């Protein structure tokens, strides 16, 4: 996304988000660099930075002089300037966490809740949120984000089988979370949330175009292009778990047979009942076909493997990347491996859910917080 400010008077909150986003993406940075980058005057940027410092969202640090003259102060995001609630709802249980602006999980809670129905799940989420708030390990709470398995609004696939959330049809999840927490609430499928968390806090600083393969109870993925998720017409692009992998193979709850996630997912791993190494050897050809399909469809810089699986299992699967055969990604001049492991696997969707809230209230595209702060100061 190109960050450009506006000279219109009504654009003051927007300009603050632009400046804050520039600091987040490029910090440590200077006022002059920000002004050049976003198309505002240095005076305007300095005024905005002063407001951001007063709101404790930005830290200003001046290095010791190394010669003549005083070096300009550099600006970074204050990790403790705000926190978000991240919630990850799965067919196995629920996790809730406080996450700071740097993406660190400050505190977290977990409840085992297999196939929890809505009322039970929201009651548990409410308990965990109150526990986290009571610990007092947070400053300003920006919002709450929830991640849960997709696809959304596809009756034949969204509410059936062990890898989805049965019984959640027609539930206004975002509004329930907003009412429960008293905060702006955001919702996303878990694979997109995990990819957003990786974009903000992990490998997104190295790659602009990559496919995030989310290995969880089920299997999904999203293509990240220049910092944004490619969503598709109805927001469900990336459901790679339901591409045909084995002709005439295992029946899938979606109504088809031989779907990829019947063979490659945590659900498949648990049903197989084999040691990690044996199972990985068994699924190696299927996995290789899946990666080649992703590469030929999306032409990513790399495929990032993440998800909820134990790190030992993720690492063993990643070794299969060394044996990938030909696709459009098999080029001699590659700068990166065809397959890499995400910077954070077990908490990827949880941090991503919190990132939804941070991104939602601070991003130039979706920001709400500054308008709220302005009203409170009026």
Image (cartoon, rainbow, N blue to C red):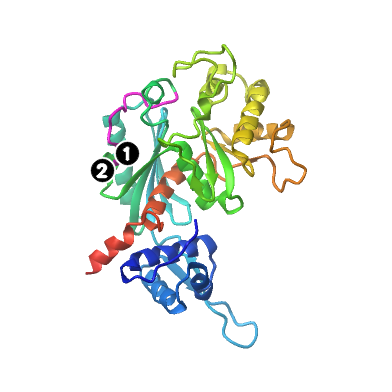
As measured in the structure, the alpha-carbon distance from the residue carrying label 1 to the one carrying label 2 is 8 Å
Nearer to us in this view, 192 or 209: 209
Residue 54 left/right relative to 37:
left
Q: Earlier in the sequence, mark 1 or mark 2?
A: 1
> Where does the magenta region start and end?
163-174
| Residue 241 falls left or right of residue 337 | left
Mark 2 Cα-neighbour bin, 10 Å: few <14, some 14–19, many ≥20: some
Task: Identify the image quadrant of residue 313.
Answer: top right
For the question of whether residue 277 can be seen, the reply is: no
The answer to whether one can see residue 97 in this image is: yes
Q: Position of residue 130 (x, y in %)?
A: 29, 45
Residue shown at 55%/44% (left/top)?
A: 344
Q: Nearer the viewer, mark 1 or mark 2?
A: 2
Secondary-structure class at tag 1: helix
Instruction: Look at the image and say whether residue 168 sits in the magenta stretch.
Output: yes
Q: Residue furthest left?
A: 378
Is 215 above or below relative to 32?
A: above
Quarter holding residue 268: top right
Examine the rendered structure and indicate whether residue 343 appears above or below residue 323.
below
**Residue 61 vs residue 327: left or right?**
left
Instruction: Give the main secondary structure of the magenta stretch.
Output: loop
Residue 330, x across and y down, in percent: 73, 37
Residue 317, placed above or below residue 31 = above
User: Circle 2 sits in a helix, a strand or a loop, which is it?
Assistant: helix
Query: 156 or 63: nearer the eye?
Result: 156
Instruction: Quarter of the image for the C terminus: give it.
Output: bottom left
Mark 2 and mark 1 in contact (Cβ < 8 Å)? yes
Identify the residue position indicated by label 2 in the image: 180
**Residue at the image position 53 percent from the left and 65 percent from the top:** 27
Q: Which residue is mark 1?
A: 125
């Amino acid at each position: 996304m190109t960050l450009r400010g506006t000279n219109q008077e009504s654009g003051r909150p927007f300009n603050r988000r632009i400046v804050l986003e520039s600091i987040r993406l490029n910090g440590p940075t200077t006022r002059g660099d920000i002004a050049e980058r976003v198309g505002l005057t240095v005076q305007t940027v300095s005024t905005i930075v002063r407001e951001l410092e007063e709101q404790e969202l930005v830290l200003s640090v001046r290095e010791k002089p190394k010669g003549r003259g005083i070096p300009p102060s550099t600006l970074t995001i204050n990790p403790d300037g705000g926190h978000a609630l991240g919630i990850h709802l799965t067919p196995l249980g629920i996790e809730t966490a406080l996450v700071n602006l740097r993406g660190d999980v400050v505190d977290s809670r977990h409840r085992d809740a297999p196939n929890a129905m809505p009322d039970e799940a929201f009651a548990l989420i409410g308990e965990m949120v109150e526990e986290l708030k009571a610990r007092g390990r947070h400053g300003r709470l920006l919002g709450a984000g929830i991640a849960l398995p997709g696809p959304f609004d596809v009756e034949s696939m969204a509410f059936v089988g062990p890898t989805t959330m049965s019984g959640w049809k027609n539930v206004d999840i975002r509004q329930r979370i907003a009412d429960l927490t008293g905060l702006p609430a955001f919702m996303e499928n878990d694979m997109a949330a995990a990819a957003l968390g990786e974009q903000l806090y992990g490998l997104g600083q190295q790659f602009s175009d990559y496919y995030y393969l989310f290995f969880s109870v089920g299997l999904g993925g999203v293509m990240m292009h220049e910092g944004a998720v490619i969503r598709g017409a109805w927001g469900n692009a990336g459901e790679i778990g339901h591409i045909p992998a084995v002709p005439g193979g295992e029946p899938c709850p979606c109504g088809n047979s031989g779907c990829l996630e019947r063979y490659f997912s945590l659900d498949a791993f648990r049903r197989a009942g084999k040691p990690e190494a044996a199972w990985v050897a068994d699924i190696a050809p299927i996995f290789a076909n899946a990666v080649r399909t992703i590469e030929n469809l999306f032409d990513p810089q790399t495929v990032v493997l993440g998800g909820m699986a134990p790190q030992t299992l993720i690492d063993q699967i990643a070794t299969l990347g060394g044996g990938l055969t030909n696709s459009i990604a098999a080029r001699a001049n590659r700068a990166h491996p065809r397959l890499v492991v995400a910077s954070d696997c077990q908490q990827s969707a949880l941090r991503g859910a919190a990132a939804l809230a941070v991104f939602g209230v601070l991003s130039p595209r979706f920001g709400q917080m500054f308008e709220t702060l302005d009203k409170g100061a009026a």
